[in-house]
Image: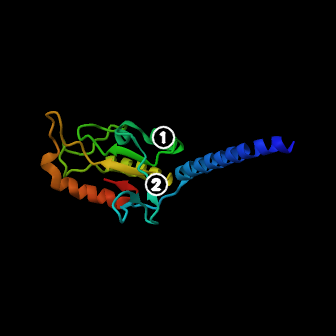
Amino acid sequence: MEKLYAQIKPNTSKIMKKTVCILLLFCGFVGVGLAQFKYPLKVSENKRYFIDQNKKPFLYNADTGWFLFWKLGKEEAKEYLSIRKSQKFNVIQTMLMLPEEANREGIRPFKNDNDFSTLNEAYFDHVEWVVKEADKLNLLIGIVPVWIGCCNSDWGGNNLPMQKNWVDILVNASPGIVI
């Protein structure tokens, strides 16, 4: 019996070590998915990765919901964000607007045909609501402010000073926004 035990014991030890390592790895991944980060993010001292305000490393694990603000109503946006959170995403990468596109409620971002100086407050109220829902779930919103050109479309490029004004306002509204 001792001979048999001697043969089993080394293998059992290896199996136990592997099992413990797998469990620790699993717990580490689950822990990362459940981690609560303190925004805004910043770059680490060695400039190799993001950290939160508590200096905890942040892996930018994003889903690209480019049309979030204008294709989804409130309940759909809330459901989308909840699903992405349950799937362990921690960032939603999106575009703030396409100036000529209206949102689900038919509201355009500007009152006068792509005139960046005529913000439509109702459009940005919806954006703010979605950002607050993301904040509740501790999701970071990565925003591309506006599509300013490619493929022979170049609107927006002439309005960069005005864009800076409303982008500054938006960033100050929530620490959970990256532009």
Give above or below for 145 relative to 37: above
Q: Position of residue 154 (x, y in %)?
A: 14, 40
- Residue furthest top in the image: 151
Q: Quick one: which residue is furthest to the front in this view?
A: 3
Q: Where is residue 98 in the image (x, y as percent from the top left)?
A: 26, 40
Which residue, given by chain and number where applicable, does mark 1 sit on?
75
Q: Could you say which disc has been placed on residue 87 in the image?
A: none
Q: Given this view, does label 1 or label 2 mark the residue nearer the observer?
A: 2
Residue at 36% x, 62% y: name it: 42
Tag 1: amino acid: Glu
What residue is at 48 percent from the left and 54 percent from the top?
A: 138
- Provide the secondary structure element on which disc 1 rests: helix
Q: Where is residue 50 in the image (x, y as percent from the top left)?
A: 39, 58
Residue tagged 2:
135
Q: As drawn, is 94 to the left or to the right of 138?
A: left
Q: Which amino acid does label 2 sit on?
A: Asp
- For label 1, the crowd category at 10 Å Cα-Cα, with few meaning under 14, some 14 to 19 and many 20 or more, is few
Given residues 39 and 42, the one toward you in this image is 42
Q: How many marks overall?
A: 2
Q: Nearer the viewer, residue 102 or 17?
A: 17
For label 2, the crowd category at 10 Å Cα-Cα, with few meaning under 14, some 14 to 19 and many 20 or more, is some
